[in-house]
């Protein structure tokens, strides 16, 4: 038994950490989020050159053939710099859904372009009414002329404005809330009938409302069999949640480190505020929360490995761990974020200081793909019933 | 990352499981569930003698003194299986507290005399640290030992002495010099409870039971050969022992078993036609605890894995006592909530049938006595001070 990273993982980890430390300070980040596209194409190309974009993809498509654990290694370090480039939306989510799909020709065509950095993608699933229930889909896909016509609107499509392609949930059969009948299509952002409005989100990233107005797609653009999209989403969701959680852990440990350092230098009443016991105990509690979160992440990773090694045994333990992980991220993220602001005092309220930006990314992660309460409820449903 | 044990370790786990299943029988379990009283002493001693006969009584000791020679992994597996099986830990005062001090700092004569009797559970030990004026601030103790002739003359009071009423020996921190800084001038003495001038006074705790005591010393003569190490250096020895106590694991296996029992009971308790386990609010309370415990399990594994790898435990080891005790208390609290009105009923001589409920009395006393967990072994506030200083550098 061990919780060590492999040599390869340590190399990737060091490489991402070096980038964050040397290239991605808070002023650089500020320039990027205020730029027209809200991301740095130059840095994205760097990520491609360093091989980070290839991590989860199979070797037959030019990928690194990595595991959930490898993704977590990258994400934790990206979190320490609150990197806004669309790693989660393009590589983990869009790429993850594509890679797990049964459409081999689509994989052959698109995955290499994700890896070389030329294709940005986003998962367009949210609708005005749907909140965290991904199966709540009223966007329609109606069969026509050997293909389908998609009509509907998707909201808060993360980095939708820069995406070249979308994976879209559309209902091909069934009622609004049915899991059965949700289909996944890959749609070109430039396709006729696709239009969008882009905006900033509180964490410095971008999102868009995307309209699909009589968008024509062919069978070739279908990711799984018709109506079986939810199975694919359910299969990929745990690794998306783990990736976001690893990013959150990187943010939390950074917030704690910055806050402890600040408390050692900030003088009040003639002494560093870190000498006050009431503040010490609060920082100990945030330290404990962070370590417990790390343990929960490691639990998720170990359970992912177990499931990968022995898929026939089912993924119940993995799912249980992942729901618990996302719920834990919500609780410890709130504690650590709020304490970081409070312990900094007035300066913690300023946009100029980095603290608030870390906190806002934590808050956004909390509401991505289900908040803490949502996942705790899922956890309860899986584990408690008589 | 790899969460699996080796085939050898799994074989060892099976051996431990088999032994526990065979030797820890229902009668013993029943007697030990009393947790105190005369039955408790004879039951725990008979269990410890079984462990001694098997050679498993002191996994923490060096092999030359009677330890098992187990690897870190084997020790971890043993503890986990013990907790999972609901078997109480050995009484720690002799085996886990004074013995390491004796085999580390004691004379050959002390080792030869005391260690075998600790291993065989023929001597029952208690701990004489805390005093009415010295709790978490242990070094403030004022029990004195004056050196005269070949003896120390001990005067003072020790308090919160668990199971002193059963004890043959007490190990004490006593002040032998008032000249020095308060951590210095303290000595480590072993005192026979039969010595004239030693009196044990019971303290009834808030669970209505008697496990705690005051121990009074009035001109008690203690032979010089019962001094551990050098005079005035006792604090150093005690600190080494406290570190031993604090790196103890978080009793995750025990908590997992308690939680599973709690879930089973929640499935049986029905409120307005709905089993409590299906009540959404109760479910949230339950999963608040269960998720913390799932994380703590991996914190414990992380600590264990770094020690098994030959390294020192990382900073995460410092949170084990705080989180472990908080979670235990949270489970006890929810158990008491589950017992509803019965939680407040003092069962007295009533049978469960007459009372109308089967676990309420236990739930109440566990909750009440459970409050001690965040006080003893360095209160959780003191633990936070330690982390602030040692880990955060504040």
Image (cartoon, rainbow, N blue to C red):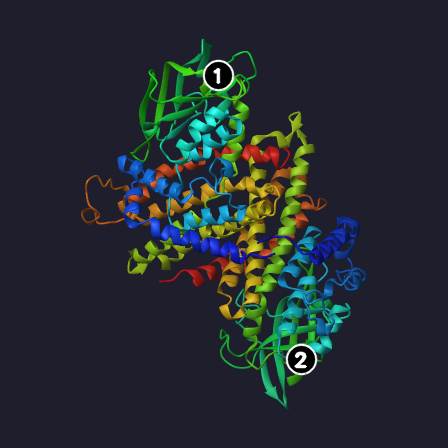
Q: Position of residue A105 (x, y in %)?
A: 69, 81
**Local secondary structure at mark 2:** helix
How many numbered markers are drawn?
2
Q: Is residue A254 found left or right of B376 in the rendered image?
A: right
What's the residue at 27%, 35% (across, down)? B38
- Which disc, if any, is residue A207? none
**Local secondary structure at mark 1:** strand
Task: Please identify the quadrant where the C terminus of chain B is shown.
Answer: top right
Q: Are marks 2 and 1 in contact (CB under 8 Å)?
A: no
Task: Please identify the quadrant where the N terminus of chain B is shown.
Answer: bottom right
Q: Mark 2, chain letter?
A: A
> Which sits in the foreground, B235 or A27?
B235
Q: Is residue B388 above or below residue A317?
A: above
Can residue A334 be seen in the rendering of this structure? no
Which numbered mark, 2 or 1, is in the foreground of this view?
Answer: 1
Q: Seen from this angle, which residue lies furthest top?
A: B149
Q: Is residue B193 above or below residue A227?
A: above
What's the residue at 60%, 40% (across, down)? A342
Q: Position of residue A63 (x, y in %)?
A: 72, 69
Q: Mark 1, chain letter?
A: B
Q: Position of residue A210 (x, y in %)?
A: 66, 71
List the residue tagged with mark 2.
A104
- Which disc, if any, is residue B175? 1
> Which sits in the foreground, B146 or B60?
B60
């Amino acid at each position: 038994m061990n919780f060590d990273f492999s040599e390869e993982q340590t190399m990737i980890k060091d490489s991402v950490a070096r980038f964050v430390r040397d290239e991605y300070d808070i002023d650089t980040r500020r320039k990027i989020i205020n730029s027209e596209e809200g991301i740095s194409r130059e840095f994205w190309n760097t990520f491609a050159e360093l091989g980070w974009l290839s991590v989860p993809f199979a070797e037959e498509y030019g990928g690194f053939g990595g595991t959930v654990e490898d993704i977590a290694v990258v994400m934790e370090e990206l979190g320490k710099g609150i990197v806004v480039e669309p790693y989660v939306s393009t590589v983990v989510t869009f790429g993850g859904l594509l890679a797990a799909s049964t459409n081999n020709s689509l994989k052959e065509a698109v995955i290499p372009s994700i890896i070389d950095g030329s294709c940005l993608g986003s998962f367009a699933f949210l609708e005005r009414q749907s909140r965290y229930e991904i199966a709540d889909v009223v966007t329609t896909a109606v069969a026509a002329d050997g293909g389908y016509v998609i009509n509907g609107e998707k909201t808060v499509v993360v980095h939708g404005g820069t995406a070249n392609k979308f994976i879209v949930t559309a209902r091909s059969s069934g009622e609004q809330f049915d899991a059965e009948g949700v289909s996944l299509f890959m749609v070109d952002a430039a396709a006729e009938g696709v239009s969008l409005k882009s905006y900033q989100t509180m964490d410095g990233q971008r999102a868009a409302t995307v309209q699909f107005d009589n968008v024509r797609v062919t069978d070739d653009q279908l990711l799984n069999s018709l109506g079986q999209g939810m199975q694919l989403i359910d299969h990929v969701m745990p690794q998306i949640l783990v990736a976001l959680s690893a990013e959150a852990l990187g943010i939390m440990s950074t917030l704690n480190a910055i806050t402890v350092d600040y408390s050692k230098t900030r003088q009040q009443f003639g002494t560093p505020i870190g000498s006050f016991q009431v503040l010490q105990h609060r920082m100990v509690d945030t330290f404990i929360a962070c370590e417990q979160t790390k343990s929960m992440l490691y639990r998720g990773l170990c359970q992912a490995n177990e499931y990968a090694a022995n898929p026939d045994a089912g993924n119940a333990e993995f799912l249980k761990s992942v729901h618990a992980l996302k719920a834990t991220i919500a609780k410890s993220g709130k504690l650590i974020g709020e304490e970081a602001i409070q312990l900094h005092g007035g300066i913690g309220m300023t946009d100029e200081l980095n603290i608030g930006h870390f906190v806002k990314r934590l808050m956004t992660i909390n509401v991505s793909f289900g908040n803490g309460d949502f996942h705790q409820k899922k956890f309860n449903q899986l584990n408690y019933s008589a | 990352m790899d969460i699996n044990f080796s085939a050898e370790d799994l074989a060892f786990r099976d051996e431990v499981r088999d032994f526990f299943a065979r030797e820890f029988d229902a009668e013993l379990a029943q007697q030990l569930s009393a947790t105190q009283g005369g039955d408790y002493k004879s039951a725990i001693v008979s269990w410890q003698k079984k462990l001694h006969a098997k050679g498993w009584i002191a996994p923490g000791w060096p092999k030359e003194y009677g330890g098992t020679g187990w690897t870190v992994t084997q020790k971890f597996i043993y503890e986990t299986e013990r907790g999972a099986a609901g078997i109480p830990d050995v009484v720690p005062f002799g085996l886990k507290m004074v013995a390491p001090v004796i085999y580390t700092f004691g004379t050959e004569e002390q080792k030869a005399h005391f260690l075998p009797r600790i291993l065989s559970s023929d001597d029952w030990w208690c701990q004489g640290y805390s005093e009415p004026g010295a709790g978490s601030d242990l070094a403030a103790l004022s029990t004195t030992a004056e050196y005269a002739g070949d003896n120390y003359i001990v005067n003072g009071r020790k308090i919160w002495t668990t199971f002193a009423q059963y004890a043959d020996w007490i190990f004490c921190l006593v002040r032998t010099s008032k000249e020095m800084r308060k951590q210095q001038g303290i000595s480590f003495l072993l005192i026979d409870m039969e010595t004239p001038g030693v009196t044990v006074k019971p303290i009834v705790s808030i669970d209505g039971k008697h496990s705690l005591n005051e121990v009074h010393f009035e001109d008690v003569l203690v032979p010089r050969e019962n001094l551990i190490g050098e005079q005035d250096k006792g604090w150093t020895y005690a600190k080494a022992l406290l570190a031993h106590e604090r790196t103890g694991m978080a009793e995750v296996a025990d908590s997992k078993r308690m939680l599973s029992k709690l879930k089973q009971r929640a499935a049986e308790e029905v409120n307005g036609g709905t089993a409590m386990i299906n009540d959404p609010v109760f479910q949230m309370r339950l999963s608040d605890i269960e998720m913390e415990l799932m994380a703590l399990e991996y914190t414990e594994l992380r600590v264990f894995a770094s020690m098994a790898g030959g390294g020192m435990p990382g900073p995460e080891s410092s949170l084990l006592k705080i989180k472990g005790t908080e979670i235990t208390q949270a489970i006890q609290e929810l158990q008491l909530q589950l017992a509803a009105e019965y939680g407040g009923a003092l069962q007295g001589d009533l049978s469960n049938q007459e009372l109308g409920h089967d676990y309420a009395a236990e739930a109440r006393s566990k909750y009440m006595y459970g409050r001690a967990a965040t006080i003893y072994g360095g209160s959780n506030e003191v633990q936070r001070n330690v982390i602030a200083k040692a880990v955060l550098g504040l």
